[in-house]
Image (cartoon, rainbow, N blue to C red):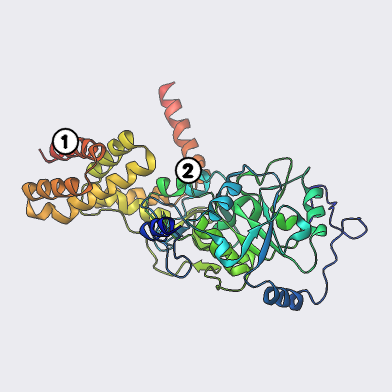
């Protein structure tokens, strides 16, 4: 008996003190996805990658608003959103204390403005995404003149681009004939 | 709380209909006082992958030891104060789930456990899945996670028992005027950044490739003003600190790209 007690004292207490003391998570532990709404460009890469559709996008073309939604209750913490995010706006934190009484507290939303097409005035792409593309072109050493041309192109919706291309293609075809 | 065909086993008129007591909040408060340090938990698996069960059993092991709070897993819902619903609510398990609910004495606390229990999780759009446990029974506490770690389990139970408070809250961000995203590593040529990210992801896979590329680029940005020798030195210091031959291999390859780009 005494020997057993000695052994127990030598081994000590294996039980973790959590919840009375914070718990250290292992490096690489994937907990709640943290979204930085300032860095996000609403490109929807994460929503496409998300296997359980915990991340989703919704578009309101009347108001010109693109909304990013996260429902933590459905998240499986696979970090696919983190790996596809082009701006590092979403990262998985070690936070695991996610229990809630009210289901709506598991929801996160971020609303972004859409840019209206230069020609037809219909909303078509997030404003921040276009700005980000312009910034990327500037950084990769494209001349200011070409950036301005690119901006003209970026601010036109795909439908109008198609319409503009038709006369050009027709004239090219006529020249060829 | 409606099933896919509009009919729901818990609706009025069904023999499984749930009629919560109007004073249910008060009763639950009294229950929590009565069962302090002696909480009997019954686990209802509604069609999950058993990952959640493994984590529940991990949390009653000596390392996490929820039994120090008196939490005990029992084998009959008739003994239970707390019902833990794990797994997505499948069509075939909805009636057994309701029977377990009715078998437990009132008042009882229902916990939706795991991503599937909270909302259907990755199975949410399957033909046979109704959704989370809240589609069929009234749920008091949601513990998301896939599966929730034993730490998350302890936290969720402590919340269900009124010992700890809730930390999560809903967030709604609206874009402000003049809000711009920033390019990553504007100090580096974008071609170099892309090449390094590609190579790193080729060697280490997507998520870790990104992380390794970021740590390499961080070192470059921090020390490239002091010359190539300093960068080399700092990278060697970082590698010896990490002490991982796989990381060394990847960094060597990334360094070759960096050197080729500088020429």
Q: Residue at x 82, y 75 (%)?
A: B22
The picture places residue A122, in percent across and down from the top left corner, at 55, 55
Would residue B190 be visible to someone looking at this image?
A: yes
* Residue at the disc numbered 1: B256
Up-down: is B192 above or below B25? above
The picture places residue B260, in percent across and down from the top left corner, at 14, 36
If the image is split into quadrants, where does the C terminus of chain A sit?
top left
- Residue B141, by quadrant, is bottom right
Q: Residue at x 50, y 44 (%)?
A: A49
The picture places residue A69, in percent across and down from the top left corner, at 55, 58
Up-down: is B76 above or below B22? above
The picture places residue B114, in percent across and down from the top left corner, at 60, 53
- Horizontally, residue A173 falls left or right of residue A59, namely left
Q: Of A85 and B162, which appears nearest the observer?
A: B162
Q: Residue at x 27, y 52 (%)?
A: A138
> Local crowd at mark 1 within 10 Å, few (<14), some, or many (≥20)?
few
Q: What distance separates the C-alpha of mark 1 from that of mark 2?
A: 42 Å
Per the image, label 2 sits on a secondary structure element best described as helix
Would residue B1 be visible to someone looking at this image?
A: no
Q: Of B29 and B33, which appears nearest the observer?
A: B33
Q: Residue at x 20, y 54 (%)?
A: B187
Up-down: is B19 above or below A170? below
Q: Are marks 1 and 2 in contact (CB under 8 Å)?
A: no
Chain ID at mark 2: A
Q: Of B194 and B228, which appears nearest the observer?
A: B228
Q: Which mark is residue A111?
A: none
Up-down: is B51 above or below A167? below
Q: Nearer the viewer, mark 1 or mark 2?
A: 1
Q: Are marks 1 and 2 on the same chain?
A: no
* Residue at the disc numbered 2: A161
- Horizontally, residue B6 falls left or right of residue B59, namely right
């Amino acid at each position: 008996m005494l020997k057993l007690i000695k052994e127990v004292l030598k081994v000590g207490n294996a039980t973790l003190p959590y919840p009375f003391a914070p718990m250290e998570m292992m490096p690489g532990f994937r907990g709640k996805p943290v979204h930085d709404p300032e860095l996000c460009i609403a490109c929807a890469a994460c929503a496409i990658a998300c296997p359980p559709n915990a991340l989703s996008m919704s578009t309101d073309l009347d108001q010109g608003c693109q909304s990013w939604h996260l429902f933590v209750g459905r998240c499986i913490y696979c970090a696919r959103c983190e790996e596809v995010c082009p701006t590092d706006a979403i990262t998985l934190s070690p936070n695991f204390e996610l229990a809630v009484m009210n289901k709506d507290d598991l929801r996160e939303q971020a609303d972004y403005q859409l840019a209206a097409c230069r020609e037809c005035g219909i909303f078509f792409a997030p404003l921040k995404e276009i700005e980000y593309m312009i910034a990327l072109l500037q950084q990769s050493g494209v001349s200011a003149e070409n950036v301005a041309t690119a901006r003209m192109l970026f601010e036109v919706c795909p439908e109008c681009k198609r319409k503009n291309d038709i006369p050009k293609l027709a004239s090219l075809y006529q020249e060829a004939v | 709380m409606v099933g896919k065909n509009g009919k729901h086993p818990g609706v009025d008129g069904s023999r499984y209909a749930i009629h919560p007591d109007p004073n249910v909040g008060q009763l639950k408060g009294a229950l929590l006082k009565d069962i302090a340090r002696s909480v009997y938990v019954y686990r209802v698996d509604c069609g999950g992958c058993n990952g959640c069960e493994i984590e529940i059993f991990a949390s009653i092991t000596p390392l996490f030891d929820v039994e120090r709070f008196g939490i005990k897993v029992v084998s009959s819902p008739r003994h239970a104060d707390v019902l833990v619903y794990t797994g997505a609510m499948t069509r075939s398990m909805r009636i057994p789930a309701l029977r377990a609910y009715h078998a437990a004495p009132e008042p009882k606390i229902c916990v939706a456990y795991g991503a599937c229990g909270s909302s259907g999780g990755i199975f949410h759009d399957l033909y046979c899945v109704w959704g989370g446990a809240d589609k069929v029974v009234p749920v008091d506490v949601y513990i998301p996670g896939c599966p929730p770690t034993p730490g998350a389990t302890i936290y969720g139970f402590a919340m269900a028992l009124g010992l700890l408070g809730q930390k999560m809250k809903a967030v709604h961000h609206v874009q402000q005027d003049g809000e711009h995203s920033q390019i990553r590593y504007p100090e580096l040529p974008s071609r170099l950044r892309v090449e390094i990210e590609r190579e790193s992801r080729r060697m280490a896979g997507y998520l870790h490739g990104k992380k390794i590329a970021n740590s390499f680029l961080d070192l470059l940005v921090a020390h490239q003003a002091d010359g190539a020798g300093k960068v080399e030195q700092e990278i060697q210091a970082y590698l010896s600190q990490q002490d991982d031959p796989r990381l060394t291999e990847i960094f060597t390859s990334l360094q070759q790209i960096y050197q080729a780009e500088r020429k």
